[in-house]
Image: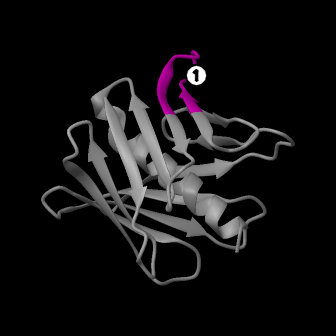
């Protein structure tokens, strides 16, 4: 399964559209003004399906993840020198990026690829293509890329 993640250009808060391979909107993401990033994820029927909240006052970036309103876990950036790395605590997934922080690979504890995240660089807004091995993991991969993009945005302020 493939998804295209595109940030809306003219938006005061974080706002994203996520499209499938046919150009159909699958998810919409809307930011809320708060300390740290707070992102609400809606499905194609405008139903709230998830929330990502940045935890502030932490040494390394960390985000709490919610499916609907139920806490499911967190994603934490690890301390590394050259390549970014994240841990997703509730799925036992590891996320590793390349030196430029444009491409990421999500693997399970056995090294099986769950998904690939590729930043497309010649766009006016943040745009990522997501390749997901199993459709049931699409929502969780989306949450990962939202957290990665939010921590990069916070770091560049």
- Examine the structure image and report whether residue 112 is included in the region drawn in magenta: yes
Determine the residue positioned at 73% across, 66% down: 58
Q: 127 or 48, which lies in front?
A: 127
Furthest-front residue in this view: 122
Return the x and y of residue 1 as percentages of the image width and height: 31, 29
Q: Give the range drawn in magenta.
A: 105-116
- The x, y position of residue 61, in whole percent, is 68, 59
Rendered view: 31 above or below 84:
below
- Residue 156 rendering spot, x and y as whole percentages: 71, 68
Up the image or down, 152 lies above or below 105; here it is: below
Q: Count neighbours of disc 1 (C-alpha within 10 A) and say few if under 14, some if 14 to 19, many if 20 or more.
A: few
Q: Is residue 152 highlighted in magenta?
A: no
Q: Residue at x 52, y 44 (%)?
A: 120
Residue to which mark 1 is pinned: 109
Name the side, left or right, on which 152 lies relative to 140: right
Towards the viewer: 56 or 82: 82
């Amino acid at each position: 399964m493939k998804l295209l993640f595109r940030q809306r250009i003219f938006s005061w808060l974080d706002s994203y559209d996520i499209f499938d391979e046919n150009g159909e909107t699958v998810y919409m993401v809307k930011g809320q003004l708060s300390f740290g990033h707070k992102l609400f994820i809606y499905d194609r029927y405008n139903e709230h399906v998830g929330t990502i909240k940045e935890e502030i006052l932490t040494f390394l970036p960390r985000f709490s993840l919610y499916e609907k309103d139920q806490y499911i876990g967190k994603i934490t950036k690890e301390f590394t020198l050259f390549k970014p790395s994240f841990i997703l605590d509730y799925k036992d997934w590891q996320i590793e990026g390349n030196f430029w922080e444009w491409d990421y690979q999500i693997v399970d504890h056995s090294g099986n690829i769950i998904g690939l995240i590729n930043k497309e660089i010649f766009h006016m807004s943040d745009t990522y293509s997501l390749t997901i091995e199993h459709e049931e993991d699409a929502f969780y991969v989306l949450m990962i890329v939202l957290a990665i993009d939010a921590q990069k945005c916070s770091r560049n302020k």
